[in-house]
Amino acid sequence: MTWQVLVHGPLARLDERVSRSLVDSVPRPLSELAADLGNMTVALPVLGCAMAYAVWRGRRAAALCAGLAMALVPLLVVALKEWTARPGPLEPWAAGYYPSGHTATAMVAYVGAAFLVSNRLIPVAVALTAITGTGLILRGYHWPLDVLASVALCLPLLRWPVYAARYGRAAPGARQREGSWGTRTSGTPSRSEDGPTS
């Protein structure tokens, strides 16, 4: 995708034709509302609350990984925006539209929060991300490829909190099977499981 955008290849030209047929196909207030789900002022508090909940439940590694994933979003997105310098659908004089920062923010924030709280929330998080990307396209803030590139960019970032969450859930059972110090009677690890002191 990135190569097609850089050389303005057939895929990029098709992307622009599709976008022009979609912009303002729904009322602007509706597409604006959907696009706003990717604002940092909306998405970051959701992730922050989920991280706090995960820490409270003793899943500090997963919370840390989710926070690091979000911290990497602007670094990666801004670098790609500077490199590609793609103009926007409604602002051809401007540059820096590829990939979509709002889509990346929404995806990492909502999906990351879902992994931290409950896997049953993942479909909701995916839906919120899809609504954000669709709103950005319909409002004319981004081309469709901008949104798809952000999804592809964020998938590897979301593996960190997923792996950390799985490891955090599996570790106590593994320690228990190995006969670690202390007896587990609840989901909260005891201080005696830190190992022998001599």
Image (tube, rainbow, N blue to C red):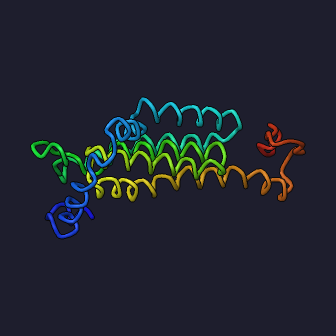
Residue closer to the observer: 121 or 76: 121
* Residue sitting at x 86%, y 41%: 186
Q: Quadrant of residue 197 in the image?
A: top right
* Residue 198 appears in the rendering: no
Image: 60 above or below 179: above
Q: Position of residue 170 (x, y in %)?
A: 73, 55
Q: 136 left or right of 85?
A: right
Is the residue 194 above or below the residue 166 in the image?
above
- The image shows residue 52 at horizontal and vertical percentages of 61, 32
Q: Is residue 187 left or right of residue 183?
A: left
Q: Can residue 163 be seen from the camera position used here?
A: yes
The residue at the point 38 percent across, 38 percent down is 30
Farthest-out residue, bottom: 10
Left or right of residue 121, residue 1 in this image = left
Residue 114 sits in which quadrant?
Answer: top right
Q: Quadrant of the N terminus?
A: bottom left
Taking the view exactly as shown, the residue that stands out farthest to the left is 93
- 115, 14: nearer the viewer: 14
